[in-house]
Amino acid sequence: MPTLSLKSWIIVFFVLLLFLVQVAGFLLIDRANSHNVQSKIEQELQAGEQAFVSLLDEHRVRLKRAGTVLAGDFGFRQALATNERATILSALRNHASRVGANAAMAISLDDCDGPIAALTCGMTLSAISSIERLASAGSTQSMPA
């Protein structure tokens, strides 16, 4: 087995040293990039969450305002008091289209122990049955006086 000369040993040593430096540099840069990407993703998610919550709040305020307008409508209140179903449905359709809602409903909770009467417009039968199931589950709970 031939022995390596000093020159060969020096070349092998520097090649191995260069390889180790390259690996260490790669690992450090990869870790730094991963950390930067992770923090950037977290910032973007937080910004997206804030925008989404802001939009939800604006939507909630708009719907609350629309509900207040409808509740203050004398004609609608009169139709509810006299139980004029056609007028109530017409008012619900009109108000839903005015505020850009896909559906509107009026629910009567006059008799908490009895069935809940509801008039809906623009709702599918499955949505109405889901609401009825929720209402039935909620009517079994005691309501504060």
Image (cartoon, rainbow, N blue to C red):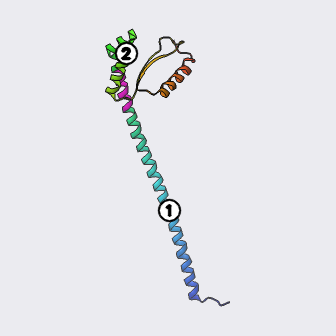
Q: Residue at x 38, y 9 (%)?
A: 82
Position of the N terminus, as image quadrant, is: bottom right
Q: Nearer the viewer, residue 60 or 27?
A: 60
Indicate whether 108 appears above or below 56.
Answer: above
- Under mark 2, the amino acid is Ala
In three-dimensional space, the C-alpha distance between marks 2 and 1, rounded to whole angstroms, equals 68 Å
- Magenta part of the chain: 58-68
Return the mark for residue 86.
2
Which residue is at the far top?
A: 82
Query: Magenta span: helix, strand or loop, mainly?
Result: helix
Expressed as whole percent of the image width and height from the top left, the position of residue 28 reads: 51, 64
Nearest to the eye among marks 2 and 1: give it: 2
Expressed as whole percent of the image width and height from the top left, the position of residue 136 reads: 55, 20
Q: Residue at x 52, y 21 (%)?
A: 135
- Under mark 1, the amino acid is Asp
Q: Residue at x 51, y 71 (%)?
A: 22
**Mark 1 residue crowding within 10 angstroms, few (<14) / some (14–19) / many (20+):** few
Q: Within the magenta stretch, is there residue 66?
A: yes
Expressed as whole percent of the image width and height from the top left, the position of residue 79 reads: 36, 12
Indicate whether 4 appears above or below 91.
Answer: below
Q: Which residue is mark 1?
A: 30
